[in-house]
Image (spheres, rainbow, N blue to C red):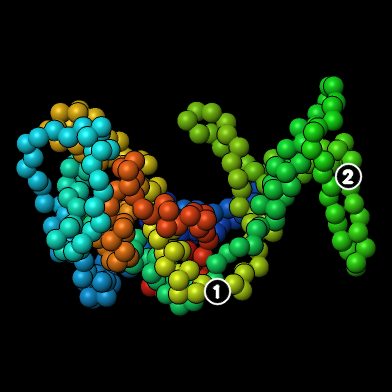
Amino acid sequence: MDYPYIDDPLFEYLNKVADNFWWEPVHDFDEETCEEYFIEQPSFVPSWFARRYLDGKIDLSTLPLYIEAVQEEVSKKHISWQTLDKTPQHKVQSTKESVPNISMTLKAYGLDISKFWYLCICIKDWVVGKTCEGARIDDNLTPREELQAIVNEIGKLDYQLCGITHKSKSKAKLTLNVKRKNTIISSEQTLAILAYAVSQFLESDYCKKTEIIDGKETRVLKPVTVLDSCELSEKRLTKQMAKTVRLALFYEHLNWFMEHRKVDEDLVKSYPTLISTNKDLLISRMAFLTGLTDDSRFLVPDNAGKGYIRTAISGYERIKVKTDNKYYGSGF
C-alpha cells in the first residue's frame, strides 16, 4: 500500500496521531507456533484526509479565526496568576471580536501553527465522519473486560487466600441466573478463589504474550477474537448526544498528542505576560476554532485557567463508537 504523505513535514503531527489511533491491522499467522498476530501498518487516514482537503470536502470556514488566533501579540506588562484570579471573567460578546490569542501557548509547547492546524482539522473531520449518520455507541463490554471487571470487584473485598484470612467489612454475592434458577455465591473464600482463577487465565499465554520492551520482559495483551469482540449495541446517538460524543472523541485524540508535548519553562518564565499552558483550555479553544462547536464558552478559561470542554464531555470521556466512519473507511 502506498502512503504518499508519510514523510510530509506538514503532516508530522497528524501521522503520529493517526498511527496511534487509526493504524491498519494486517492479520497474519505464524505456522511454526500456530498463533495469529497483527502487523501494525502505517495509517492511511492522512492520505484520505489530504484527498478530501484537495477536493474541497473539508469545512474550512473557521480558518480565518484560527489565523487570527495564532497572530503573535506584543505585550509589555507582566500579569501574575494572583492578578488573573482577581480579574472577572467576561463572557464572549462577539466571536470575531473576541478570538483568544493562542500564539504563545503554541510556542510554549513548541508547536508549528500549520502542522497543528492540519492535525486538529483532520481530527475534527474524522469525528464528524464517525458520528454523522446516527452512529451506534459501544456500551457492551468484551468478554475480557467483563472478566477483568469481576476480578476487580471481588478484589475490593481484600480477602487473602494465602496467609492469615480475615473477613472484610463489605459483603458480596455473585448471582448466576440460568433458566430462571439462581445460583448464589456469597462465600468470600469462594469468590476469592474464583477471582484468582480468572486472573490467572487473563495472565496466561492464551490472553497475553511476553515481549522485550526497553530491555525488559513485559507481559502485554494479545489480540484474541473470542475475548476481544462483542455484539454491537443497538443504541444510536441522538443529535444532541452526537455533539457531545464528537467533542469527547476530539478531546481524546488531541489530548493524547498534547500529553507527549513538553512546555518550554524558560520561555514561560521569561515572557512579560502570562502564557496559558493549560492543555484542556487549548483543546477547548481548538474545538471552537475548527468549527466543531459554536459555543463561545469553549473560548473562555474558568477561574482556574482551564477549558470548558471537560465539563461538556463529562460522562463520555471513554465513549466508543463502533459504526464505520463515513469519510475514512471502516474498522476504526
Q: Residues within 10 Å of mark 2 (few under 14, many from 20)?
A: few
Find the distance from the CA under tag 2 to the CA under tag 1. 37 Å
Q: Report x, y in % for residue 224.
A: 65, 54
User: Which mark is on residue 125?
Assistant: none
Vertical comparison of 248 with 328: above or below: above
Q: Looking at the rendering, which quadrant does residue 127 occupy?
A: bottom left
Q: Residue at image x 50%, y 28%?
A: 215
Which residue is rendered at x = 60% and y = 45% of the image?
221
The image quadrant of residue 60 is bottom left
Looking at the picture, which amino acid does disc 1 mark? Arg
**Element class at badge 1:** loop
Measured as percent of width and height from the top left, residue 239 is found at: 45, 74
Name the amino acid, label 2.
Ser
Q: Which residue is mark 1?
A: 236
For residue 186, the mark is 2
Left or right, 151 with reference to 331:
right
Where is residue 46 drawn, in percent x and y? 32, 61
Q: Is residue 156 left or right of residue 174?
A: left
Q: The residue tagged with tag 2: helix, strand or loop? A: loop
